[in-house]
Amino acid sequence: MIAAGVVASAIVAGVISWGKRNSKEVRTEIEIIASDERVWQILTDFPKYVKWNPFITKISGDLKKDARLKVHIQPVGERRMTFRPTILNVEPKRELHWIGRLAVPGLFSGEHIFTIEPLGENLVRFIHREIFTGLFVLIYAGNFDTNIRRGFEKMNHALKAQAEQSISLS
């Protein structure tokens, strides 16, 4: 019985270690003609996602460090998925960062990071990325550069349209 526990612990430790060394990042960015404040306002107004966001269709939960969110995504060409990530960082007008994991450590996790970089008055670079780690990265690696990337890009363009529309209406 003890030997089985030691073997199981070694396997779990090995999977976790392998998962940390093997990762895949999807990174997209877009320039938006709007203030960092305006982009942040749209990005963090979760109840309105359903009206404009084609990729992350719904988020509920508190916008604070260590809070759990409920996030619904609609990847291009796939069925809708729901995740329960934990917020790692909230830096107003700069970064929103969360991590979602499958129940078993080392199988799959995704760190989703939104970064807003001011480039000038009413001009920002919006960086949208996710770092995937774990055993399932091997299985889904091809999907990251296609459907996930396309979903990120669709969201980026929708965010840009929302932010720039509000500027032109002012």
Image (cartoon, grey):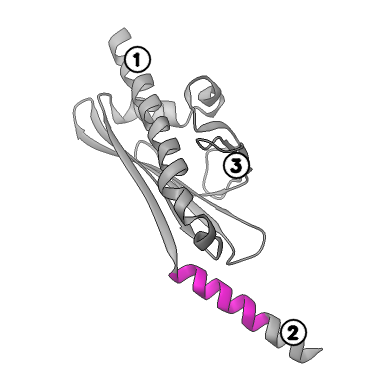
Tell me the crowding category of disc 1: few under 14, some 14 to 19, or many 20 or more residues within 10 angstroms, Cα based: few
Extreme-top residue of the structure: 169
Residue 96 lies in the magenta stretch: no
Query: Residue 125 at x, y = what percent?
Result: 26, 36
Q: Of helix, strand and loop, which one carries label 2?
A: helix
Task: Tell me the residue that label 1 is attached to.
Answer: 166
Structural distance between the alpha carbons of marks 3 and 1? 27 Å
Task: Tell me the residue that label 3 is attached to.
Answer: 69
Asked if the residue at tag 1 contacts the one at tag 3, i.e. Cβ–Cβ closer than 8 Å, the answer is no
Choose the circle earlier in sequence order: 3 or 2: 2
Query: Residue 33 at x, y = what percent?
Result: 25, 24
Tell me the crowding category of disc 2: few under 14, some 14 to 19, or many 20 or more residues within 10 angstroms, Cα based: few
Q: Is residue 43 above or below residue 4?
A: above
Residue at image point 74% right, 84% down: 5
Structural distance between the alpha carbons of marks 3 and 2? 34 Å
Residue at image point 43% right, 31% down: 43
For the magenta stretch, what is the residue range? Answer: 9-21
Disc 2 marks which amino acid?
Gly
Q: Assign the magenta stretch its main secondary structure.
A: helix
Asked if the residue at tag 2 contacts the one at tag 1, i.e. Cβ–Cβ closer than 8 Å, the answer is no
Tell me the crowding category of disc 3: few under 14, some 14 to 19, or many 20 or more residues within 10 angstroms, Cα based: many
Query: Residue 75 at x, y = what percent?
Result: 52, 38
